[in-house]
């Protein structure tokens, strides 16, 4: 068993351990001891955009890549700016979930239906 430096994303305590290939928090009362492992297993580097239809009204939700939180770029998210200024939008405004990535060569946002 190895002690891992850092804090548990579920409870904030610094009692994360690594053994048998898995990360696990041993903090007393931790609501999700496997949170660090689950986050690393699902660390998609893309934005996930969901467009929800409520009849006459629609709304969206966005899951940002974890790296945007680590390097601070979440506060200056280029995808949010592109949406705000209508530089990009979901294909046909069809409700659903999309993986969105930036293609630097084409200087364009790519939408993939999930």
Image (cartoon, rainbow, N blue to C red):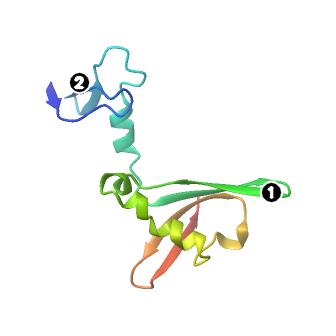
Q: Residues within 10 Å of mark 2 (few under 14, many from 20)?
A: some
Closer-to-camera residue (21/93):
93
Residue 63 location in percent, x, y? Answer: 51, 52
Q: CA distance from mark 2 to mark 1?
A: 45 Å
When asked about the image quadrant of residue 103, the answer is bottom left
Q: Residues within 10 Å of mark 1 (few under 14, many from 20)?
A: few
Residue 30 location in percent, x, y? Answer: 37, 20
Residue at horizontal 34 percent and vertical 57 percent from the top: 72
Q: Quadrant of the C terminus?
A: bottom right
Secondary element at tag 1: strand
Position of residue 45 relative to residue 37, above or below, is below
Residue at horizontal 63 percent and vertical 72 percent from the top: 89
When asked about the image quadrant of residue 6, the answer is top left
- Taking the image as shown, residue 80 lies to the left or right of residue 1, namely right
Find residue 42 and name its label: none
Position of residue 102 relative to residue 27, above or below, is below
Residue at which label 2 appears: 15
Q: Quadrant of the N terminus?
A: top left
Residue 36 location in percent, x, y? Answer: 33, 35
């Amino acid at each position: 068993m190895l002690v891992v430096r850092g804090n548990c994303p579920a409870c904030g305590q610094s009692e994360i351990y690594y053994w048998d290939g898995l990360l696990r928090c041993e903090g007393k009362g931790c609501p999700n001891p496997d949170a660090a492992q689950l986050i690393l297993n699902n660390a998609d580097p893309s934005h996930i955009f969901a467009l929800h239809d409520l009849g006459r009204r629609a709304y969206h939700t966005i899951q940002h890549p974890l790296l945007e939180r680590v390097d601070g770029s979440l506060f200056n998210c280029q995808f949010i700016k592109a949406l705000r200024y209508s530089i990009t939008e979901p294909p046909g405004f069809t409700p659903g979930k999309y993986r969105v990535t930036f293609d630097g060569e084409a200087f364009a946002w790519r939408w993939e239906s999930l």
